[in-house]
Each structure stands twice: as structure tokens, then as C-alpha cells.
Image: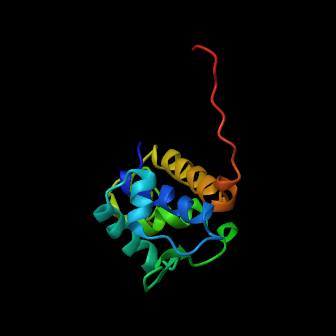
Amino acid sequence: MRLSTKGQYAVRAMLVLTMRQDEAPIALRRISELEDISAQYLEQIFVDLRKAKLVEGVRGASGGYQLARPADQITAGDILQAVEGPIAPVECVRRKQPEVCERANICITRELWKRLRDSMSAVLNTTTLADLANTKITHDTEEV
């Protein structure tokens, strides 16, 4: 299972805003340069982030984007749900109603998928941008 590039890029872009939140709003072009992400793709992502009220746009010569809330109040789950929709490994556990699949009530594996969804959600919904910004990147120098 893999997240789409849209979700990955959204988290990366939000981290740029987090790391520079004490500065002026940041233009999408600058985020694009820093993260090597297409500016057009970022525009699409930021439409979803604005709708979810995770970012605010600032107009003007020194305009750009900034976080709409403090970094410790925005989770990775908030970001991914804004751009990807509900987090779920399979469609039948994506929503509360299992009617998506005619086998939902008799499916032996559905409970496994629900547990996986809940575990993923727990990690994503308890990891804030502030947590990620405070994470130290370490590189293992040992040969594998």
C-alpha cells in the first residue's frame, strides 16, 4: 500500500510552512523550488488544503501561504484526509457503512482491514506538524 504523491507532497509542503512559520508567508513558487515539486501540482494541492482550512493565502507583493492554525494543532491525518480523503487500505472500510461490498457482513478479512485502518489513523492523527518539525533526521552510516 502506498500513499499517492499528492499526499506525500502535501505533507512536505506543510512542513515547509511549519519550518518557516516565523517568516513572511511563503509563495508556492518558493515551496516548489525548495521541495522540487511542480508549481502547478502544488496549486492543486493547496486548493484542497485551503478548503480544509489548513492554510491561509495572503495576497500582495509579499504574499503567499501560511498555516491556518499552530503546527501543534495540525496532524498528518488532517493533511492526508484533506487531499486524499478518508484513510483506508481497502474500500469496504473507507466509510462507516459496509454496503460498498456485498460480502462485508460475511467477509473474514474485513476485520483485518479495519484494524489496519485504525492503526494507520492512530499514527496519522496523533502526529502533528510540530512533532515532524522537531524530528531529527539521522542517517545510518553502517553498511547493510
Q: Is residue 126 above or below residue 89?
A: below
Q: Nearer the viewer, residue 104 or 142?
A: 142
- Residue at (54, 67) in percent of width and height: 78
The quarter of the picture where residue 140 lies is top right
Please state, as top left, top right, bottom left or bottom right, where the N terminus lies in the image.
Answer: top left
In the rendered structure, the answer to whether residue 72 lies left or right of residue 76 reads right
Q: Is residue 50 above or below residue 119?
A: below
- Residue at (57, 79) in percent of width and height: 68
Q: Residue furthest bottom?
A: 60
Q: Nearer the viewer, residue 89 or 65?
A: 65
Residue 27 visible in the picture: yes
Q: Is residue 79 above or below residue 116?
A: below
Q: Residue furthest top?
A: 143
x, y percent for residue 108: 46, 44
- Residue at (31, 62) in percent of width and height: 41
Residue 96 visible in the picture: no
- Residue at (28, 64) in percent of width and height: 40
Q: Residue furthest front?
A: 61
In the rendered structure, the answer to whether residue 81 lies left or right of residue 42 reads right
Please state, as top left, top right, bottom left or bottom right, where the C terminus lies in the image.
Answer: top right
The quarter of the picture where residue 18 lies is bottom right
x, y percent for residue 60: 43, 86
Q: Is residue 60 above or below residue 16?
A: below
